[in-house]
Amino acid sequence: MAIVAIVFCFLWHKSQQKKIQALEEIIKELIRSKDNLTKQVNELHVGSVGLGKKVFSLNSTIRDSLERQQELVAHDPDSKLYTRAVKMVELGADLEEVMRECDLPRAEAELLLNLHAKAR
């Protein structure tokens, strides 16, 4: 009976050893998976930081471009003349008056008058 108990204990111990080895392999695989996922998360983090910097840079560039565009429009004397000519046409000025006051060629003054007439 003691021999049977010893054999049984030996077989049970072998079975437990196999289970422990299987669990150790599973743990090693989980550690490899965790390390791989950690690496991927770090790469995503670095990429998103770079992307955030790029978006910030693009926003700054767009803002600067808009400011420069507004400055150009504000300092463009031709733009002011055309704006004034449009206002004169809206107020009912005739062709000769627009040409004289805004120093516009006949063709441009006629174009403004025709555009304003079509807009009505």
Image (cartoon, helix red, strand yellow):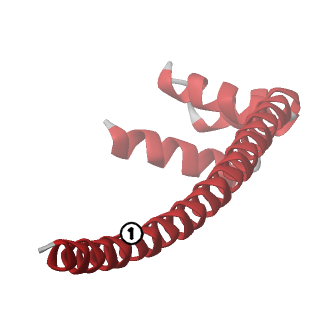
Q: Quadrant of the C terminus?
A: top left
Q: Is residue 35 left or right of residue 103?
A: left
Q: Please give the residue where the numbered disc 1 appears in the rendered image.
A: 20
Q: Is residue 68 above or below residue 107?
A: above
Front one among 36 and 55: 36
Front one among 46 and 27: 27
Residue 100: image x %, image y %? 77, 32
Asked where in the image residue 23 lies, by quadrant, the reply is bottom left
Q: Is residue 7 left or right of residue 14?
A: left
The residue that appears at 56% across and 69% down in the rendered structure is 32
Q: Residues within 10 Å of mark 1 (few under 14, many from 20)?
A: few
Q: Is residue 74 left or right of residue 59?
A: right
The residue that appears at 74% across and 34% down in the rendered structure is 63
The residue that appears at 53% across and 63% down in the rendered structure is 31
Q: Amino acid at mark 1?
A: Ile
Asked where in the image residue 79 lies, by quadrant, the reply is top right
Q: Is residue 48 above or below residue 10?
A: above
Residue 66: image x %, image y %? 74, 36
Residue 101: image x %, image y %? 77, 26
Front one among 88 and 15: 15
Q: Quadrant of the N terminus?
A: bottom left
Count the marks: 1
Front one among 35 and 51: 35
Q: Is residue 93 above or below residue 3?
A: above
Asked where in the image residue 104 lies, by quadrant, the reply is top right
Label 1 residue SS = helix
